[in-house]
Amino acid sequence: MKLTGKRKIQIGVLLLPGILVFAIFTCYPIIKLFIMSFFEWNYGSILDQNFIGLQNYINVFSDEYFRTAFVNTIIYTLVTVPGQMILGLLVALLLNQVTRLKVTYRVLYYLPVITSWVVASLIFKYVFNTEGMLNYFLTDIIHLTSENIRWLDTRWGGLCIAMFLGIWKGIGWNMIVFLAALQTVPTEYYEAASIDGASSVKKFFHVTLPCIKGNILFALVMLTIGGFNVYTSVKMITNGEPGHQTDMILTWMYHKAFNTGDFGYSAALSFVTAVVLAILAVIQFRLMQNKDN
């Protein structure tokens, strides 16, 4: 349908506020941040920045603490993404068979998703603290140990607790995504598989999974982005301690920007993270496409 000149102007006027908001609050900050990554930008050079080229990027890749934070983020993502997806799919499969109190069960599993990250992180910190509830239960109630376990004072202890929280909060979101997908699978496929003598396991792998592959890819990409953007839980539970050994990319970026004032470094780090996420997203799409062929 061809649009008249007057109609095009009306559409342009209606779109203009949204385009301006997007340009001012999204496009401009990204462009400004990219420019900052090539300058020496800190508290002492806010008014007079020196162009230093790729030095900020060199500093990022040569930084030992960044490498630790990057490895921590990779480990967090590799553990929490499959954990959330597998448990979320399992819950969705179970709830898809429920005939009574379906809404109640869905709400119960979704409650962790809408729980504040700050509140949940503080609760986990209270439970796993050296003088916290878990140690009180282990030492004073069941007398399993005579000394308090320092859960949060080691790198792997802090990471495991953060990963546990991430999986717990993400199960409900995955449950909703997969439950919606399962309800779109035609029942005729299952009936045909039953006639061919397929077991429940074969139905799952040869009927269910292929039919919800698009939703699996969507969840995989979104959860990977979320894994690289983990911040609140680590900040509230360990704050990068001990010695920045539990820092993630975003908590280390925050530290460099607002604790040391090295905004140029943080800007470069943000674009390194964006490139890594883009590469991972392309790889995930390619792998899913290859399975279709």
Image (cartoon, rainbow, N blue to C red):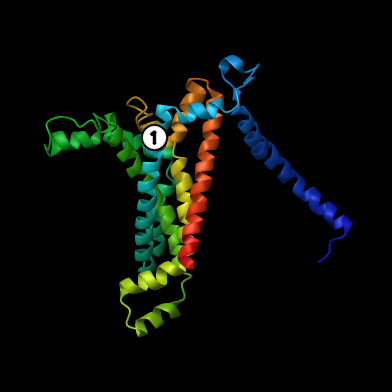
Q: Residue furthest right?
A: 5
Picture residue at 48% right of the left edge, 48% below the top: 280
**Relative to 35, residue 198 above or below:** below
Count of labels in the image: 1
Residue annotated with mark 1:
234
Q: Which residue lies furthest to the bottom in this view?
A: 195
What x and y, as percent, mark residue 98?
Answer: 36, 68
Residue closest to the eye, 107 or 45:
45
Residue 210 visible within the image: yes
Relative side of 171 to 143, left or right: right
Binning the other alpha carbons within 10 Å of mark 1 as few (below 14), some (14 to 19) or many (20 upward) gives many
What x and y, as percent, mark residue 169?
Answer: 39, 47
Picture residue at 56% right of the left edge, 19% below the top: 42
Mark 1 lies on a secondary structure that is: helix
Residue closest to the eye, 151 or 58:
58
Figure quadrant of residue 23: top right
Figure quadrant of residue 121: top left
Picture residue at 48% right of the left edge, 29% below the top: 60
Figure quadrant of residue 130: top left
Q: Residue furthest top?
A: 44
What x and y, as percent, mark residue 137?
Answer: 18, 37
Q: What residue type is labelled 1?
A: Val
**Relative to 9, residue 203 above or below:** below
Picture residue at 38% right of the left edge, 32% below the top: 68
Q: In which quarter of the image is the N terminus?
A: bottom right
Relative side of 148 to 7, left or right: left
Residue 218 visible within the image: no
Residue closest to the eye, 184 or 272:
272
